[in-house]
Amino acid sequence: ENGTASALWSEYQTGWVEQQQDQLYLVVELTQAIRHRRFEFVVQPKVDLSSMAIHSGEVLLRWHHPEKGSIGPDVFIPLAERVGLIFKLTQVVLNLTFEWVALHRAALKSCSLAINISARDLLQPAFAQDTLALCQKYQLEPARFILEITETTALSDKAMAIENADLLRAAGFSLSIDDFGAGYSSMQNIHRLAPQEIKIDRQFVRELTINSTHETLCRSLITLSQDLHTCATAEGIETAEQLALLKQWGCHSGQGYYLYRPLAPDDFLTLLRTQQNGH
Ligand code: C2E
Ligand code: CA
Ligand code: CA
Ligand code: CA
């Protein structure tokens, strides 16, 4: 009996050690990937729900691992947040996106690009200045970009975050609160960041038609966005039924597999072209 317990314990320990080693190895690989910019991105259209036109595209990062293939951000972003690699990763995304937009500035003229940043980025004293400088380097107007802020629970130094947010907004960037309603993003934080957009988290949209609590929550988030004079974007729309309800409740904008899947950058440009040609 006792033997079994200690065998289990040692197995548990071995498992734990292996897990730690895997994580450590992944951190080393991620560091190298950042150094060699081994990342690509896809773009998912964001749609105006009254006209159904694409008004922007969200840049979603993909890591191309030499052996493991494409690794999704759900694996490496939380890890990067934990070990402090998120700042470098944000720089990678900003550079990749600005470079691409500069190359296709005419085709992207009437479409803004949404970039995911971590709330932790806003705690870096020079974040707003550096981002502006980078934008100027590529000769791009900040008004082309929406910064989607995730992990707002991490906002420890509120004054610093607000200072950066104010600078970015004054320069023309739009700010968006990502995954709204999920976690524990305090209303006060959100109010003081004065975002132009809030994104209703996928989990509420998913269970819209089967869970009445989520229905109520979704509707109140849309009302709240109207009171705050911001745009509400629902993410993760997967069915016609979800889309119809969100439209009916006055949600401005939407995103999800039912509308469009994330696309390779070139395919996104092609899609925009067909839309501009009146299809
Ligand atoms: P997010 O910002 O909430 O991004 C939306 C995620 O939902 C994307 O997953 C997208 O592919 C997925 N999605 C979109 N429509 C649907 C749908 O209808 N159904 C379902 N089931 N999923 C849908 P992805 O690309 O795996 O990204 C996951 C998360 O990783 C993002 O969530 C974001 O928080 C983070 N992330 C992605 N790219 C970056 C980045 O460049 N920087 C940072 N800091 N975070 C990023
Ligand atoms: Ca996002
Ligand atoms: Ca989200
Ligand atoms: Ca998310």
Image: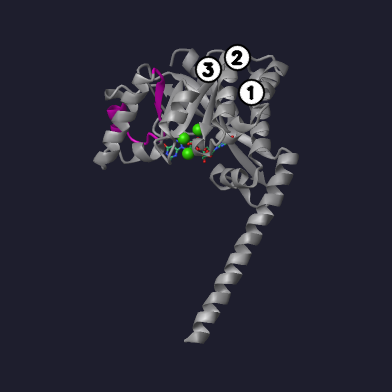
Helix, strand or loop at label 2? It is helix
User: What is the distance, in whole Å, between disc 2 and disc 3 at their CAs?
Assistant: 18 Å
Residue at the image position 61 percent from the left and 32 percent from the top: 123
Res. 66 visible in picture? no
Identify the mark at residue 171; answer none if there is no mark.
2
Residue at 65% x, 27% y is 127
Give left or right: position of 188 versus 209.
right
The residue pinned by badge 1 equals 128
Report x, y in % for residue 51. 37, 16
Q: CA distance from mark 1 to mark 2?
A: 9 Å
Identify the residue position indicated by label 3 in the image. Answer: 111
Query: Can residue 135 be seen here?
Result: yes
Q: Could you tell me which quadrant the C terminus lies in?
A: top left
Q: Which residues are magenta?
A: 229-246
The amino acid at mark 2 is Ala
The image's colour scheme reads one colour
Identify the amino acid type marked 1: Ala
